Amino acid sequence: MAFSTHIPLPLLPVPPSWFPGHMMKFTRMLPTLLTRTDVVVEIRDSRLPLTSINKSLEGALRKWRLERGWDANDPTRRVINAGPCERLVVFNKRDLVPEWGMEPFRLAMAKKCPDQQVIFASWHRPRDIHNLNQTLIDIARKYPHTPELNVLVIGMPNVGKSTLLNALRSMGIKGKTPKAFKTSAQPGLTQAISTRLKLSLDPLIYAFDTPGVMLPYLGQGSRGAERGVKLALIAGIKEGLYDMDTLASYLLYRFNILNPISPSYLALLPEGTQPIIDLEMFLTKVAQRMGMIKRGAELDLSRAAAYFVRWWREEGGLLAAPPTDFLSHPIFTANQVAQNSLQETPPLTHGWGFDFEWQISPDDFKNATDESDVASVIQLKMEECIENYLADSEAEIRDESNVSATQRKKQLSLEEKARRKAKFANRSRSRFEYTR
């Protein structure tokens, strides 16, 4: 039996541009804000741990660390330790991703991005909030001569920044505390930098909430189109820029890629249904199973698509990754390994969430004897994915694939104005010197 199949990526629309003025304003203000920031807490989405990285802020954060004394060649070494300068990356909504991938991912990130301290959390778990609060308190107490710790919370739209600060405030300030910030399921509610919010009295910790900042341009080709759909799935892009059929078609594709034999969406379909590649057929089955009928006794496929997307957001993301019982898998058992190596068994597609996808073969587990060995293999696969993602991101920046035609036109216009201004200034200077 074949355990993998070739499933084509559905035709995805060109990613929309959604970068309102308040996002641009914050991006320009960030370097100034960092001069009075001691800890940066970046919130990302556990379901898309790589796609929810905001590369447009990375340059300012790198410069901030260098100015505070961190070694440019060794991110774990600090040359000048004059005060607090820490970067925490909090992956929110941990309750929507499989537990087995968290520790391998944390270890993989520690190797590939040693300047970032990774924390998984869910705002629905008081223990996670307490642990994050304690981390901030520990940082503050490492620097007893610093009168107060200033925390800047940043991230993509709708990753839960305001909700986090409300929870931290309730945890750190005893007694009844009012909700400090408004929250919304739709991205873009916070459009200005907040006033300082007190999170702790002893030690004294303040925080700033910031607007969610989208990437100015999501990229070109299929990579940019896929990135846009992923962010729309976690509601990180303004609602209405993508239709539900597009999101449903990508979801169906990813489920089939990660587990073509028994994809998790089968739980939504009539018992005994086989995996489906065609979107219309799939939505028809969902509508029939859920009794979604519109006027005229016609199946409501649009409602079925919206239901499928909502299901993934609420619980399907937890089921999207296949299990990791490789040691008992038919193609990985000791008796089968020798036969499979002779038969050249095709590799098994596996992954964690929608950002991690790798190929697994019997050779990967020839020395594995227990679950810790399996976790080590998964960590190596994740390291490869992270390394490839970072390399692709750098290539996009070099090739300007992350700059839209409109942005490039504006950039050229600004450069031309700067040249003319410099030319006029030089000419005026020459005339002044001549008259003297």
Image: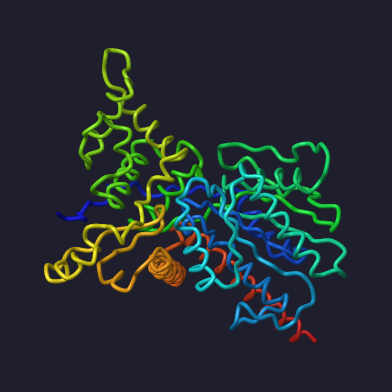
Image check: 266 left or right of 318?
A: left
Q: Is residue 20 visible?
A: yes
Residue ID at (61%, 36%): 184
Image check: 355 left or right of 85?
A: left
Residue found at the very far top of the displayed protein: 296
Against 244, residue 65 (above or below) is below
Residue found at the very far left of the displayed protein: 343
Question: Where on the picture, by quarter, is residue 398?
Answer: bottom left
Q: Where residue 225 sits in the image (x, y, percent)?
A: 37, 52
Can you say which quadrant of the picture contains the C terminus?
bottom right
Against 434, residue 29 (above or below) is above
Q: Where residue 48 sits in the image (x, y, percent)?
A: 46, 53
Q: How many marks?
A: 0
Render colour scheme: rainbow
Residue ID at (25%, 63%): 332
Image check: 367 left or right of 75?
A: left
Against 158, residue 419 (above or below) is below
Residue ID at (31%, 52%): 258
Can you say which quadrant of the picture contains the N terminus?
bottom left
Q: Where residue 426 sits in the image (x, y, percent)?
A: 67, 79
Q: Is residue 395 visible?
A: no
Q: Where residue 358 sits in the image (x, y, percent)?
A: 33, 63
Query: Observer-nearest residue: 334 or 302?
Result: 334
